[in-house]
Image (cartoon, helix red, strand yellow):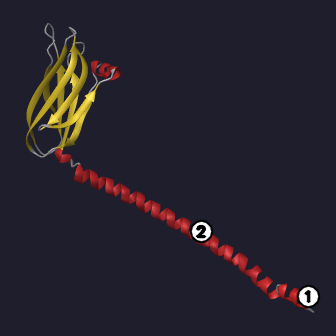
Amino acid sequence: MVGIQQLQSGRISLQKVISIAVLVPVLLAAKTSVAAGLDEELKELSTKVASHSEDVLALEQKVLHPANTRLAVFLTLQSRDALDLDSVELFVNGQPVASHLYSDRERTSLERGGIQQLFTGNLENGEHELKTVITARSADDDFVRRESTHKFRKRPGVLRLQMSLEARAPDYEPRVSFVEWE
């Protein structure tokens, strides 16, 4: 008797088997629909995040870098064979804003008429001073270091300044000139 009772208690009733057989597909279908719903929700959230990121970037550009306060300084060489440019440092109102050491490739590019953007930043309207320190080797193999200053007035809108370097024979003294681009 003891063996029969253990055997009967270990049996699964037919009713339980049928309910499990019915519930498993229902649960799997529910799981699939929940997963599909989550996938859809995730895609929607990703789209919203991308849209908000674009909005934040646009707002950041508008607030941190407004176009009406922009200053850009560009470098050109007028005497292309007279200077072997080594470095340029740029200061606005006594504060360092740019520093660049030139590679052979960059020097060649400038000597071929290239234009380098040294600095782009924001500056309030009014009177300002731009100072540059140039180190170079002149055509007569002298190492030169020159400081040059330029006072200018910043008005609303974008201000673009061209800084031109020139050195002519016989002394090959570097001269810096500034021109405001329209």
Q: Is residue 22 above or below residue 117?
A: below
Instruction: Give the amino acid at mark 1.
Output: Gly
User: At x 17% / y 47%, what residue is drawn?
Assistant: 68
Q: Quadrant of residue 26?
A: bottom right
Give the vertical position of 66 relative to 79 (above or below): below
Q: Say which quarter of the image contains residue 63.
A: bottom left
Looking at the image, which is closer to me, 129 or 48? 129
Q: Secondary structure at mark 1?
A: helix
Total residue callouts: 2
Give the percent coordinates (x, y) of residue 38: 54, 68
- Residue at screen point 30% across, 53% down: 58
Determine whether, in the image, residue 169 is placed left or right of residue 104: left
Q: What residue do we see at 32% from left, 57% from top?
A: 56
Decide which of tag 1 and tag 2 comes sooner along the chain: 1
Check if mark 1's residue and mark 2's residue have beta carbons within 8 Å.
no
Which kind of residue does numbered mark 2 sit on?
A: Ala
- Work out whether residue 182 can be spotted: no
Residue 3, numbered label: 1
- In this view, 119 is above or below 77: below
Residue receiving disc 2: 35
Q: Position of residue 11 (x, y in %)?
A: 85, 85
Please indicate, yes or no, whether residue 47 appears anywhere in the rendered image: yes
